Amino acid sequence: MRVMKELLRQPVALFGVLIVLTVVIAALAAPMIAPFDPDNQMFDGLSLEGAPLPPGGPFLLGTDTLGRDLFSRLLYGARTSLIIGLVANGVAVTIGLFVGIVAGYVRGFFGTLLMRFTDLMMAFPALLLAIVLAALLRPSLWIVAMVIALVNWVQVARIIYTETRGLVERDFIMAERSLGAGHGRILFLHILPHLMPTAIVWGTLGIATTVLLEATLSFLGIGVQPPQPSWGNIIFESQSYFQAAPWLVFFPGAIILLTALSFNLVGDALRDILDPTQRGRG
């Protein structure tokens, strides 16, 4: 409740929360809001010359190159992008938490080995690695989510490792060890609760990165495959009509930008609220 109250006191964070809630509600209620089936190629959805129709009339945001309602496809595309964003980012944060805590707590040869592997993964460009993995595997909703998770956990692992190294040297951890507390008690009751604010902040910020990466992969044709709509593949299918039908690129691009910005605003606000060292800074 304290976090929610402080979020509502910040106009910029409140704007981000409202946009995120709007996107989530639109995705959940897509079957009730969408005026048409997103895959329905309507006879009156194209002009006499076979070109997409501009926004207006029965088609709020116009139609795409196959005569499908763009507004309906964007609503269902929100489902795809949010599912990938939440699943991929949740898996990435979980992997990063596990690797970072184990490496920071165990230390020694095993901890060093884990962190050198993390450094090796960080050396590869995330987009290039995602393209290679997506090309090797058959692209689908869940495969794309797992590919993104496999390239996004390294930053979380590095941050968690650094914080864990600092925590294990604190006096209260040393006191627990001197009292004979087991590793499980120390990890789950004393270290993990201190790391959860960091995990929450990185989880929120990472959704924006994940949504952008999914859109990039779909735009390159190796993400979610048509006819299942996603914001990225809507742009990919319409890129050749950029000048003749700019709304096909502008609307999904604007939604991707606004959604990513909103998650970043919420993440920055959560960082200021949950991290005591950030409070009071402009």
Image: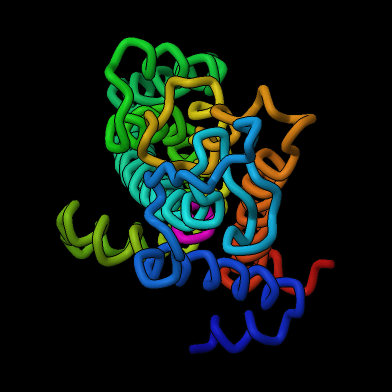
| 211 to the left or right of 224 | right
Residue 202 at what x, y percent from top left? 52, 52
Instruction: Examine the rendering and report whether any part of residue 170 can be seen.
Output: no
| 254 to the left or right of 227 | right
**Residue 42 sits above or below residue 188 on the image:** above
Instruction: Examine the rendering and report whether any part of residue 62 can be seen.
Output: yes
Q: Kindly identify the residue that appears in the image at 41 percent across and 50 percent down.
A: 38
Residue 29 magenta-drawn? no
Q: Kindly identify the residue that appears in the image at 67 percent across and 49 percent down.
A: 251
Q: Main secondary structure of the magenta part?
A: helix
Residue 200 magenta-drawn? yes
- From the viewer's side, name the closer residue of 43 and 187: 43
- From the viewer's side, name the closer residue of 151 and 256: 256
How is the rendered protein coloured? rainbow
Quarter where residue 258 is shown? bottom right
**Residue 190 sits above or below residue 112 on the image:** below
- From the viewer's side, name the closer residue of 15 and 124: 15
Quarter where residue 20 is shown? bottom right
- From the viewer's side, name the closer residue of 32 and 221: 32
| 246 to the left or right of 53 | right
Give the number of marks: 0
**Residue 201 sits above or below residue 40 on the image:** below
Q: Kindly identify the residue that appears in the image at 37 percent across and 35 percent down.
A: 227
Residue 75 at what x, y percent from top left? 48, 58
Residue 71 at what x, y percent from top left? 55, 56
| 47 to the left or right of 34 | right
Give the magenta range.
Answer: 199-204
| Residue furthest front as drawn | 48
